Image (cartoon, rainbow, N blue to C red):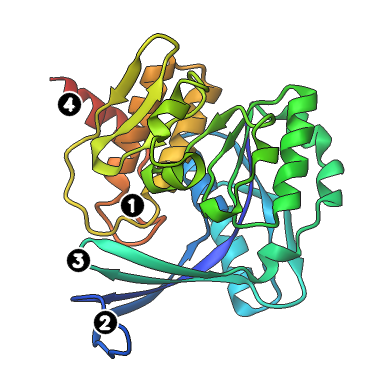
Amino acid sequence: MITVVGSINMDLVVRTDRFPKQGETAMGNLYTTIPGGKGANQAVAAARLGSGVQMVGAVGTDAFGQVLAEGLDNEGVQIEHVKQLDGMSGIANILLSEGDNRIIVVPGANHLLEEEGMDDLESLFKASDLVILQLEIPLPVVQRTLEICKRIGTPTILNPAPSAGYCKEMEPYWTYLTPNESEAEEIFGEQWEDALEQFPNRLIVTLGKNGARYFDGGRHVTVEGYETSAVDTTGAGDTFNGAFGVALSEQMPFEEAVRFANAAASLSVEKMGAQGGMPGREEVLRRMRGAAE
């Protein structure tokens, strides 16, 4: 089983032909609401790939809160540790254009989680094959969870997004760190490639359509991405992390685990919405087989 400790948001998605300039009003051609949040996205990605998944997070008492909790439950994600707290659920305002996205997150109930509550979940973490975290919830909650998992021997994936929340105090505690290229630069500087050698088979930098890169202890390894026709890149990184977690929990060889995650991420961008394009297991395996032929 995989446990995901993280954010649960409603994505408010607007698509336009081009991003407006500063002070400009642009006309959009689509508006929709889609369940999201990095934590929930990663939980759904892992569940669709066949893993048992437990979600730890919070929603509000507004209408979005009920929809978000029901959506996770419908995906097969266990929600007994999703709290419903007074106030508004988290939202993400997502602007899509020109094959890219710009996102503003308002945390809402996500930021009402408390670090002391993680102590009560130690038995859950101990029963988990892997715990996945991101940085859209209070940082003390992330830190406490990482410390508990380190002490009890449960491996963790920390997806350092948004990267501004990452701090050096987290470094001794995570098992795997999965920034994208810009996050890696913000955390480790322009020469982030050098940091790969400090964390062999632990620091994996995702490169979008170009795949992912890590250091295996002897050489730098680039695991190529897959050809795809992108419709919406929102959630590709979350799909990578959910799939990577599934692969590691199943003890796939490390390079194969990264390849599996790349294939899942490539499929996720072919439909609208962070969760809309997240693939099932057979789709991922079919893409991997097709690329190998």
Q: Is residue 62 above or below residue 127?
A: below
Q: Are marks 1 and 4 in contact (CB under 8 Å)?
A: no
116 left or right of 131 in image: right
Mark 3, residue position: 98
Report the residue at 62% width, 68% height from top. Answer: 107
Q: Quadrant of residue 228?
A: top left
The percent position of residue 213, horizontal first and vertical second, equals: 35, 28
**Among numbered discs 4 and 3, the one appearing first in the sequence:** 3
The Cα–Cα distance between marks 2 and 1, rounded to whole angstroms, is: 29 Å
Q: Which residue corresponds to mark 2?
A: 21
Task: Classify 10 Å Cα crowding around label 4: few (below 14), some (14-19), many (20 and above).
Answer: few
Q: How many marks?
A: 4
Image position of 290 with respect to 118: above or below? above
Mark 1: which secondary structure? loop
Can you identify the residue that label 4 sits on? 291
Disc 4 versus disc 2: distance between alpha carbons?
A: 40 Å
Front: mark 4 or 3: 3
